[in-house]
Amino acid sequence: MSIEEMIEQTIKSVLVETITEALEEIVPKSNVKEVMSVKDLAEYLNMSEGYIRQEKMNIPHFYLGTRLLFNKEDIDKWRLSKSNRNGMRKRLSVV
């Protein structure tokens, strides 16, 4: 390996390390998984696993093989849409 190749290799490894460290600082860290199982979702929503399984047709979900899974982003949007609709009903019923 020539000196030029060694310098190039060193520069590349330093750049990769620097970029990786910068991305780790920028990207927000989350304690919640992006894809959740029934158990994860039950804990996230503070509901029982049985209720989640019973109401799954009303909750955004998908299957991976036979595993019932939930996407956190879809769940958050679903919860927001439900709370917005309930808020509208309350406001309309008061008027």
Image (cartoon, rainbow, N blue to C red):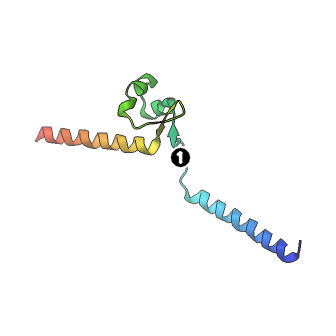
Looking at the image, residue 81 sits to the left or right of residue 42; the answer is left
Which residue: 36% across, 41% down? Answer: 78
Depth check, front residue: 61 or 13: 61
Mark 1 residue element: loop
- In this figure, which residue is indicated by the disc labeled 1? 30
Position of the N terminus, as image quadrant, is bottom right
Residue type highlighted by circle 1? Ser
- Horizontal and vertical percent for residue 73? 44, 45
- Locate residue 88, reporting x and y percent: 21, 43
Residue placed furthest toward the front = 65
Please indicate whether residue 61 sits to the left or right of residue 30 in the image.
Answer: left
Q: Quadrant of residue 18?
A: bottom right
Q: Is residue 17 above or below residue 7?
A: above
* Quadrant in the rendering for residue 56: top left
Q: Residue furthest top?
A: 50
Task: Determine the residue located farthest toward the right in the rendered image.
Answer: 1
- Picture coordinates of residue 93 (x, y %)? 13, 37
| Rendered location of residue 31, percent (x, y) | 54, 42
Outermost residue, left direction?
Answer: 95
User: What residue is rendered at 88% in x and 75% in y?
Assistant: 2
Q: Residues within 10 Å of mark 1 (few under 14, many from 20)?
A: few
Task: Residue at 46%, 42% (x, y): give it.
Answer: 72
